[in-house]
Amino acid sequence: MIARFEELDWQQTRMGELTLRRRADPATGELIYEVKLKDEYLMSSLFTVAEVQLARIGLAAATGVDLAVLVGGLGLGYTAVTALEDDRVRRLDVIEALPAVIGWHERKLLPVSAQLVDDRRATLILDDFFAVVRGAPEPEDARYDVILLDVDHSPRHALDPSHLDLYTAAGLESLARRLTDRGVFALWSDDPPDTDFMTTLSSVLNDSTAHVVSFDNRLTGGTSSNTVYVATRR
């Protein structure tokens, strides 16, 4: 029997205390998985619509077949698993900075963990996405057709100050060097569309758009929304 509330894992990380917990909804009995960093809620399986749409919107903008996809930020795994639903994806690399998060999936603690780690196309990589992007560009055959990023709250509200340089023109130019010709970059944000960031994004990549993803918020009884930015390298 699953307890009404369980702490599945707790670890001290370089960013603070990281907790994975599972609780049962008292009204429906549904199991809800939540991640906290210190006292801040990072993610919940109650709200996965935008994570799913990040993958769907990003891949919808991609052309061709045999796509190589890079996901920045593993989290609960919904973006990565949704990307694997696209039959064109031949390779999926997921970069995650916190070993605890990779461990959760390798131990199959989360609802989509088995689906993710048992897929031979998927590779979980322990690294700093932002440091990787800042590094020397990859050779042509190692670039990605799609890069999906879901780490920070928004281009203005980063989990770590060291991430903020990615959202500048110079940072986006470094990221663009990781994309194939007509490669797609898609970014999740918890904030409404940011005009200043759109201007910066458009100065580096083409066809820049901001998609507002709305969903029912069962906690508030209202509607919430996130933003998915998409742009293409030409």
Image (spheres, rainbow, N blue to C red):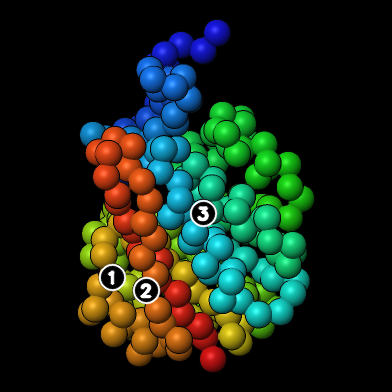
Position of residue 128 measured from the top left corner of the image (x, y, whole percent) = 45, 57
Q: Residues within 10 Å of mark 3 (few under 14, many from 20)?
A: some
Would residue 106 be visible to someone looking at this image?
yes
* Three-letter code, disc 1: Pro
Residue located 29% across and 35% down the image: 219
Residue to which mark 2 is pinned: 210
Would residue 163 be visible to someone looking at this image?
no
Residue closest to the eye, 210 or 90: 210
Q: Is residue 66 above or below residue 46?
A: below
Label 2: which secondary element: strand
Position of residue 195 measured from the top left corner of the image (x, y, whole percent) = 24, 78
Residue located 54% across and 41% down the image: 102
* Three-letter code, disc 3: Val
**Between discs 1 and 2, the one toward the N terminus:** 1
Q: Is residue 194 above or below residue 153?
A: below
Residue to which mark 3 is pinned: 52
* Three-letter code, disc 2: Ala
| C-alpha distance separating marks 3 and 1 | 18 Å
Q: Are marks 1 and 2 in contact (CB under 8 Å)?
A: yes
Residue located 74% across and 74% down the image: 65
Label 1: which secondary element: loop
Residue to which mark 1 is pinned: 193
Residue located 67% across and 55% down the image: 84
